[in-house]
Amino acid sequence: MNARPKKSFGQHFLHERRYVDRIVSSIAPKDGDTVVEIGPGEGAMTLPLLAMAKTMTAIELDTDLIPGLQARAASVGELRIVHSDVLKVDFTALARELGAERLRIAGNLPYYISSPILFHCVEHAPAIQDMHFMLQKEVVDRMAAEPGSKVYGRLSVMLQLACTVTPLFTVPPGAFRPPPKVDSAVVRLVPLPPEKRPVGDPGRIHAVVKAAFAMRRKTLSNTLKGLVDEATIRELGIDPRARAETLAPGDFVRLANAM
Ligand code: SAM
């Protein structure tokens, strides 16, 4: 216990019990759920989750933390620790390997790679039942932002096309050791059912969203030059003089399909 937190691994260990309890009761794992935790650290969330789920998997990059966690978990349940960078874990294959229809993923994420982790999970959305993540509050605000908001952008669109995004509660810096510089928040993501997922080439959708938000102050006819021409944008009933921040997530799918 109480290993020296490593900055390079984004380690901020949650120590305030009431926040651990709130996260765990938001997830409320049941015996039989296939829970996968990203970055268990010293096990603040792992041990209470394991007590409820009985068996679970945790993915940790820092080798130094693994033996201690494995030892502490032994009397609680069956914890399988995968030593890996989470970005290299194929969640679809992991679900198959664990014999699960879908995974329940949780984690107090390392903030230095929070967006790549979110995009990585979205790629595997069909293999995931839900996700509960602790992130910088500013990132949660961007994830849940609606069109017209200052913080509405690529992250909002890409996540909302794949999941329902529900911010749950804020956590102050003092709840962690060492305290991060910013407020944190817990968010729930539930992948959309197949009939609500966008129909189209994900690569194209990504390309349109990326280009449209690359220069926020420019009009769509400018930012989408070379991808979708002005006449096509107009035919879709979208004003080519509009800016990306005014478009609904579904508009980007229609633009991508018209490429
Ligand atoms: N869950 C613990 C808690 O709440 O106290 C630790 C959270 S700490 C913010 C992030 C954890 O993710 C650390 O244990 C860190 O070693 C681990 N981590 C960092 N980068 C990782 C990666 N690429 N893949 C998997 N785990 C990683």
Image (cartoon, rainbow, N blue to C red):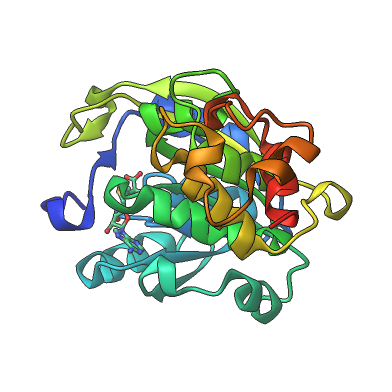
Residue 15 image offset from top left, x and y in percent: 29, 34
User: Which residue is at the far front?
Assistant: 231
105, above or below 100, in the image: above
Quadrant location of residue 234? top right
Q: Is residue 195 left or right of residue 246?
A: right
Residue at image point 41% right, 49% down: 115
In the rendering, at what x and y percent does residue 243 appear? 53, 28
Point out the residue furthest to the right here.
195
Depth order, front residue of 234/35: 234
**Residue 172 in picture, x, y percent from top left:** 30, 21
Q: Based on the displayed image, in which of its 4 quarters is residue 44 positioned?
A: top left
Residue extending farthest left: 4
How many marks the image carries: the answer is 0
Q: Nearer the viewer, residue 244 or 184?
A: 244
Up-down relation of residue 185 to residue 119 (above or below): above
Q: Is residue 116 left or right of residue 127?
A: left
Q: Is residue 25 above or below residue 95?
A: above
Q: 94 or 16, which lies in front?
A: 94
Identify which residue, 16 or 84, lies in the foreground. 84
Image-quarter location of ligand 1: bottom left
- Which quadrant holds the C terminus? bottom right
Q: Is residue 193 visible?
A: yes
Q: Residue at x 53, y 56 (%)?
A: 226
